[in-house]
Amino acid sequence: MKVYKLALFTALAAAIQIPISLNVFRDPERPHFSTLEESLWPIDLNPYINQVVVRISSSGDVIKYLRSHGLNIWAKNPSERTVDVQGHESDIKNMLAHFEISDANYIIHDLAQTVLESYPEKLKQGSFQTFAESSFDEVTAAAEDSIHAAAEVFFKLYRPLLSIDAWLKLLEETYPDVVTTEVIGKTYEERDFKVLHVLIPDSDIPHDEKRTIVITGGVHAREWISVSSTLYTIYEMLNVYENSPERWKELAKLDFLFIPVLNPDGYEYSWNSDRLWRKNRQQVEGGDGARCMGIDIDHSFDYHWTQSSDGVCGEEYSGQAPFEAYELKIWDEYLNSTNVNHNIWGYIDLHSYSQEILYPYAYSCNETPRDEENLIELAYGITKAIRLTSGKSYSVLPACVDRDLDLIPDLGSGSALDFMYHHRAYWAYQVKLRDSGAHGFLLPDKYIQPVGEEIAAGIRFFSRFILSEDR
């Protein structure tokens, strides 16, 4: 019946020329936010009421208009030359009228409801702190049976930091000879900045001869699927270590550094205050004295850094100088202090959304990366591994194209991808996970395990390639 209704709606929409919504049919098992007392909302949903997300044709004039009018760009779709935009429905209508756009595609028709549904159902039953504690208890109770029983529980839902910390501790306790969690610094809000180290002991291979692969998630706070996918990759790797002697021999030649949540303050804020928060949470001040919260970490690395043009309060604010973001100071100091011990060959930075694998450079389409042909070939190998696992297709693009540098020059500067590729890792990619737009950043939790499985397969292929390479 649901399929029939969707087909009928689509046909009617086409007939009378109204914008089609991919998100009209909400989860029937979740009540509409308007029927609930505000005390039962997981966060304050008022800022999202009457907000929508649309997909429209992109151009330089459109991008400039969106940025100057405070409309939030969710994603750019280079192959289609479209852009996904969030805004109040009246502002969206004004924008569509301004550019005489009649074929806008409404991706999310009711953002407040979609935000509500992105939170676990249990969060409505009490405060965020109560939910975080119960989530922690749920995981630790399941762990009394086995790590695998705990995994079945853990990966059913997105998890706040308290549960993630419990999970990392559980991995360390279960695999004490293989897993080490390090606290390498404190964030602006005094949270622990953690690195998880997976190093399988092998007396025949000195540590400094092992090839290090770095994997990061949670750079942007709202991209929860990047956090869960990083955590799932760790679990899958350790599960293989237990059960496959052949893979054990491969892993023993490698050294993995995982940062599941590179932006802890922002991630926690997306749980307890603003589901769609992107930046970190340090207080910043512009040259004009304006004050706001947050730096876009992925524009703050010290490689072709430029100051963003959209102001101190903008979504992509890059700070007054490179590495101004607390998290990046910590990360860079850690890499510098441990550079002798970590022979970094590979880097993968997990994000959402768009189903893309991006290779350097982000800052310019006029620069050719070293080994470009092999870089592209490896990216297609990763996409094949993903497709063979889940059937999902990922596009391969240079990061500069994804960021629309031909439209706004500063959009690609100071990226983690470029910095790690130029200074640290021989092979580097940014991977944008599911989906391609129907849910955007608000991917339902039923996709946690499927996305985790496909990206773990992609990283397995990446690891094997690095083991086979000489440079």
Image (cartoon, rainbow, N blue to C red):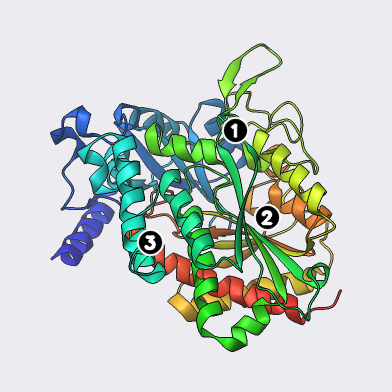
Q: Earlier in the sequence, mark 2 or mark 3?
A: 3
Viewport quadrant of the C terminus: bottom right
| Label 3: element kind | loop
Disc 3/disc 1 C-alpha distance (Å): 40 Å
Give the residue number, with chain letter if any, for mark 1: 64
Give the residue number, with chain letter if any, for mark 2: 399
Residue 48 position by quadrant? top left
| Label 1: element kind | helix
Q: Is residue 400 left or right of residue 111?
A: right
Give the residue number, with chain letter if any, for mark 3: 155
- 149 vs 269: above or below: below
- 268 vs 37: above or below: below
Disc 1/disc 2 C-alpha distance (Å): 20 Å
Q: Report x, y in % for residue 446.
A: 32, 61
Q: Earlier in the sequence, mark 1 or mark 2?
A: 1
Q: Nearer the viewer, mark 2 or mark 3?
A: 3
Q: Report x, y in % for residue 66.
A: 53, 33
Q: Residues within 10 Å of mark 3 (few under 14, many from 20)?
A: many
| Label 2: element kind | helix
Q: Amino acid at mark 2?
A: Ala
Q: Report x, y in % for residue 326.
A: 66, 34
Q: Is residue 92 left or right of residue 333?
A: left
Q: Amino acid at mark 1?
A: Lys
Q: Foreground: 4 or 346?
A: 346
Q: Report x, y in % for residue 204.
A: 78, 81
Q: Are marks 3 and 1 in contact (CB under 8 Å)?
A: no
Q: Residues within 10 Å of mark 1 (few under 14, many from 20)?
A: few
Q: How many marks?
A: 3
Q: Residues within 10 Å of mark 2 (few under 14, many from 20)?
A: many
- 440 vs 270: above or below: below
Q: Is residue 305 left or right of residue 230?
A: right
Q: Nearer the viewer, mark 3 or mark 1?
A: 3
